[in-house]
Image: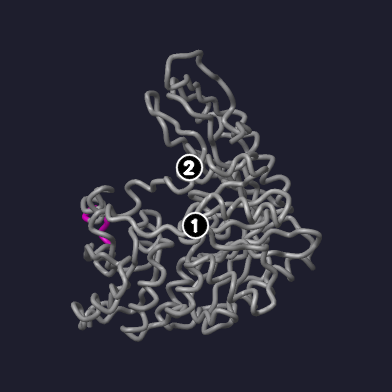
Amino acid sequence: MPERPVVMVGFVPVAVTSLAQFQPEGSVIVIDEPDVIRKRELGPKADEAPVVRELIAWEYQLEGAADAFYNAHPDLDPAAVAPLQEYATPFAARLAERYGVPTGGYGALRILRDKAVLRRVSRAAGILNPESVEVTGPDEVRAFMAEHPGPAVLKPANRQAALGTRILASPDEIDEAWAETTAMDEGVMVPDRGFELRMLVERCVQGREYSVELLVERGRAVFGNVTGKELYPGGRPVELGHLVPADIPGDLDALLRAETGRLLAAVGFGTGIAHCEWIVENGRPYLVECAGRFPGDGIVDLIDRAYRVDLVRAFWTLMKGEPLSAPLPEKAPGAAAIRFLHTGAGVVEDVSGLDEARALPGVQACSVTVEPGAEVRELRSSWDRVGSVVTEAENGTEAVAAARRALDTIHIKVRPAQDGPVQDEPAQDRPA
């Protein structure tokens, strides 16, 4: 009998590489939007990956797309169906239901995809949420800030990668922020037809930010991790770095895991992986948002390094309805960190220090994604960062210190896009 294929919704190169470690050649089917396939030139990339059997173009973000796909491919008989991108989560869940394979559940994933709905559902379950309302224009944002003095967060209810999210220090920023956040463009990552944008304004919770990653089988967590998060300073909450596991007391670690478990129970999450973000204010965790998919930003790699596991393989095992070969560890024997690079807006003149950074103790990976002549945009979302450093160590303090040393070693010369003096700075602490 030929191997039943696994279906991956949303083309993610690192995910294809991971699947190739344990899936036979020609056993992976990838579904992506036709416009995204064209703009990202995914056809040749799929052809170059022996594990990929087929790349299917399908407008999966449209209502009813999963049922239409099932009716067009009733005999596909996949072993598993899973999303690899945020916008793919409802489609993948519904498609899994139609093919009768494990899933987080279409209803649960629809709730997690919509931050406004998630607020209502989780609040009803007793989970702490910041004050939040949907808004359709700047005047409604002004009314909210008048009623809730102090900083506020303006953000989309249905986008990804911190895109279009702004922290408003005062009402004077509202008009400019509204124009910016509602005009954000994800370029090659989304279909040309676009989709409805809905906005939220919320009280800005003050505290340290964390994420919880839970691998869940039929509603029961079989693995958990708490990630410590650090943001760039300024009005746009873009991640500067992550630490796995978070360097926090055991009671806070347990509380964050428990609250994430309560949240997933509240939405009825079944089988899969969840990535939930929290801000702890005065010792109490407030929900930021939660996604029914793998975390981005290299967190999966950090988990594998710190816990000595293969989280991707464990995930696909559960999605196939198969038992894990052994229990996953409850505690990490080591620590791993990632820090991201940004230089400020301008045109890259020169990049140096990469080889020296890679040779430093604890550095496992180091990359810069721009070359001389490339234009670096102002830091507005995760897409605007220009590289990263990954480190391993015995503990979190050493892992973060190693990453900082590596970034101090990398120098990127940038000149303003309109002629001006060249900037030459370490890539690490450039503020947003």
- Is residue 106 depicted above or below 183 in this figure? below
- Furthest-left residue in this view: 72
Residue at left offset 71%, top offset 45%: 398
Q: Compared with residue 167, is residue 314 higher up or lower down, i.e. above or below?
A: below
Foreground pick, 363 / 418? 418
**In the picture, which quadrant includes the C terminus?**
top right
Counting other residues with Cα less than 10 Å from the Cα at mark 2, is it few (<14), some (14-19), or many (20 or more)?
A: some
What type is the residue that disc 2 sits on?
Glu
| Colouring mode (rainbow / by chain / secondary structure / one colour) | one colour
Residue designated by label 1: 136
Tag 1's secondary structure?
loop
Q: Earlier in the sequence, mark 1 or mark 2?
A: 1
Q: Label 2 belongs to which residue? A: 180
Image height check: is 294 above or below 383? below
Secondary structure at numbered mark 2: helix
Rendered location of residue 412, percent (x, y): 51, 25
